[in-house]
Image (cartoon, rainbow, N blue to C red):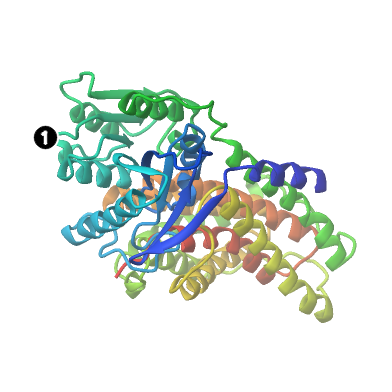
Amino acid sequence: MLVTAAVGLWLLTGHRSTRQTVADGVPLVEVHPRLAPGERRPGVVVAHGFAGSARLMAPFGDSLAERGYVVVLLDFSGHGANTRPLPDSAASTAASTAALQHDLDVATRHLRGLPDVDPSAIALVGHSMGAGAVTRYAVAHPEITATVALSLPDAAPVLPDPPARLLVLVGALEFPGFRSEAARAVEPAGPDRSMVVVPGVEHIGILYAPRTHREVAAWLDQSFDTTGDPMPSPIRRLGGAALLVVALLAGLYPLARLLFGDARGSWPSPRIADLGRGVAVAAGAAALGALAARFLPTNRLPLAIGGYLLGLTGAAGAAMLAFRHRAPAIAPTGRLRLALATPVLIGYAAVTIAVPTHLGLTHAVPVGKRWWVLLLLWAGFALLAWAAGRLTAGNAFGGLAVSALVVIALTGAAVAGLTNGFVLLVVPLLAILMLWQAAWSAVLHRFAAPAWLIALVGSLLVAWPMATALPLIS
């Protein structure tokens, strides 16, 4: 565990130093290359997508600064450390468009004012929602030298008048609509308008593909007639975070043994016969929750999609609790042990999800309203996990099956228009979080932890990323 953690932390260090600042309410991160005194270089603003952050785009800061560019990354309204809410839950209204353009203009003006930036040589790079924002901004500001759009969701901003130099990249595994919009954006193709399909990646994976970073750097180098040093691997941060997660996951077993003593429970059984009834009940409860969540007052939660998730988990969990359950026969844990174990395990879960995520993936520190929103989402996922544990007698395989049914119900709700279609892009990440939760549940069940504690600790692993990544809305 310690060796793996050390390697992970080593991979998370060694990146270029950054400077964080706030301009007109917009949190910004500056990344500077090594320059001679008085030297000025081209500047690049890098914009994230929906539910992203400046930290999510940090690998581009590493790559482009190594290439000799001065980079500014921003947190759009409602995202990351930006507590100013996004006007709507899908970034699709005129008010949200204006908010994104305002934030991008703040970042661009700040970049131009830096002493090591050539103010006449500015480029924009954006992903998904950010791709739409940077292309729209570049059309309105012809002084922008070059624009790169990753996973552009809509070509309308560049039709009929595209920016001066436009490169559009799309993942080969993305939904077909992204590729068709990319093709529309570059018609007719030419030296100043190009499209690249990045093989083997989807909507999130495109951010970490070495091919993506090479294409972006080559386009900017050609635009500014410059060259730079070889770029670092874009997956270094992600790899370091993954190793740190593995180390912390491995540390749960010795921690649980220290808190509860020798193992008294059993490892979960994958036998379908033991899980059939509970899983059948869960399927109906998940479908009911997906439908009911559309009409519950939880949708007033100031977090995009978060209110629907709270309604779904709460309604599905409550429906599951209405059925009788078979409690596993395990000796109870002493009150003194529980009084010590509860805050320790909750704190350990918070560290396990927040630290690797914040250091290697995206912004994971709750700000503003996110603190109490986190508590509500945590309660919803905890209720769901507790109900699933009661239905399946604490069997982690059963809990995983229930989680899978909830993910399927959520996917169906997005397809049916009951919630934001963005859910379809993050369903794989939600599935990974719930698999992680099942692994924790299996370990804690092995040490005869009470069902409510297993649910409370495991659900934090899922609720925390949702509460800190999804955008705040007005």
Q: Position of residue 80 (x, y in %)?
A: 44, 59
Give the residue drawn at x 63%, y 66%: 455
Residue most extreme to the right: 262
For the residue pair 318 and 107, the one nearer the viewer reads as 107
Name the side, left or right, on which 91 lies relative to 230: left
Q: Which structural element holds mark 1?
A: loop
Q: Which kind of residue does numbered mark 1 sit on? A: Asp
Give the residue at the far top of this rendering: 190
- Work out whether 322 lies above or below 91: below
Total residue callouts: 1
Q: Residue at x 66, y 53 (%)?
A: 396
Placement of 407 over or under 373, stated as above or below: above
**Residue 357 seen in render:** yes
Quadrant that contains the C terminus: bottom left
Residues packed near mark 1 inside 10 Å, few (<14), some (14 to 19) or many (20 plus):
few
Instruction: Give the residue at x 76% y 56%.
Output: 252
Is 167 rendered above or below residue 425? above
Tell me, yes or no, if residue 172 can be seen here: no
Give the percent coordinates (x, y) of residue 189.
20, 20
**Relative to 93, 124 lies left or right:** right
x, y percentage for residue 446?
Answer: 79, 57
Residue at image mark 1? 161
Pick the residue in front: 24 or 180.
Answer: 24
Residue 350 position, x and y percent, is 64, 64
Q: Which residue sits furthest left?
A: 160
Quarter holding residue 255: bottom right
Residue appearing at x 64%, y 45% in the figure: 12
- Foreground of the two, 99 or 375: 99
